[in-house]
Amino acid sequence: MRLDIYLVELGFVKSRGRAKDAIEKGNVSVNGTVCTKPSKNVDTSDVIEIAEGQDKPKGYFKLEYICEKYPLFKSDSFVLDLGSSAGGYVSYVLEILNNSGHVTGIEFSKDFRSELGKLSFENENFDIIFDDVFTIDLSNLSFSPYDTILNDMTLEPKDSISALIRISPVLKPGGHFLQVIKTNRPLVPKSLISMLNEADLQVEDVIETPFGKKELYIVGKKLEKV
Ligand SMILES: C[S@@+](CC[C@H](N)C(=O)[O-])C[C@H]1O[C@@H](n2cnc3c(N)ncnc32)[C@H](O)[C@@H]1O
């Protein structure tokens, strides 16, 4: 059987995509030798080992990379995650936060109920709200105002930015935001930057990650009014 499929069957990782990533990054060994070929043929007589901490959604590694370039929050921050999905960003934030920090996730798909429910059960400082970012009553966000808002919703860039702007009243003045843009272009269109700036969300940088070329990460701050 293929090594990537076998890792999922053994329960080491949740999906074949994650198995492939772990193998290609050199985090899996077969009979004591690192193997970087997901298609390698293995069977039950082989000893398979995987480095700790590999079973995380890709978002975990993306956010880790972005935060190394542009620190978006501190260990005691209140963070709001729009479109939490399988909890990649949330897992990374939780690793950085201490007991005085908190993360709230909003996700409208019930498909992620078990992953997000488990994370919430295991972490007192994580709450998940199943709702739509476009219609949620902002007074339900009881940890408001937030130090940081992360927005990685799979939408057209303009729609996704509109969602961030709708939620931005709960971001503290001076608080940070991350806006993910799904695009094939190398640059963020000026019209999108203007949309953010007009809503007092000042763009400070645009980051590319090595995890796939179809995303750009806009980071910045909410203006502090004098
Ligand atoms: C790319 S995934 C987010 C991945 C996540 N950042 C991670 O690290 O695992 C986008 C998520 O946004 C959710 N989403 C899209 N539109 C939404 C909306 N209007 N309200 C809430 N969630 C939404 C989708 O259901 C999907 O789970």
Image (tube, helix red, strand yellow):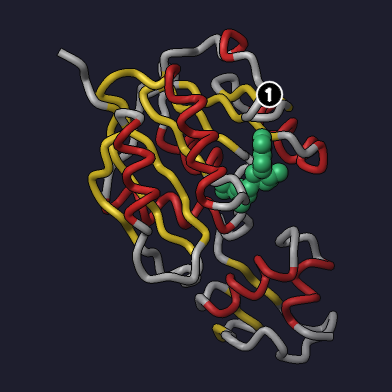
Query: In the figure, is residue 226 to the left or right of 9?
Result: left
| Identity, as a three-letter code, of the amino acid under mark 1 | Ile
Q: Is residue 84 visible?
A: yes
Q: Nearer the viewer, residue 10 or 84?
A: 84
Query: In the figure, is residue 161 to the left or right of 171?
Result: right
Q: Residue at x 48, y 68 (%)?
A: 211
Q: Residue at x 47, y 54 (%)?
A: 181
User: Residue 6: image x %, image y %?
Assistant: 80, 75
User: Residue 30: image x %, image y %?
Assistant: 65, 83
Residue beneath disc 1: 129
Secondary structure at numbered mark 1: strand
Q: Residue furthest left?
A: 226
Q: Residue at x 51, y 51 (%)?
A: 157
- The answer to whether mark 1 is within 8 Å of ligand 1 is no
Q: Is residue 86 visible?
A: no
User: Residue 92: image x %, image y %?
Assistant: 48, 43
Q: Which quarter of the rendering shows the C terminus?
A: top left
Q: Residue at x 63, y 57 (%)?
A: 55
Few, some or many C-alpha atoms within 10 Å of disc 1 (few <14, some 14-19, many ≥20)?
Answer: some
| Figure check: 113 above or below 63 | above
User: Residue 153: image x %, image y %?
Assistant: 59, 45
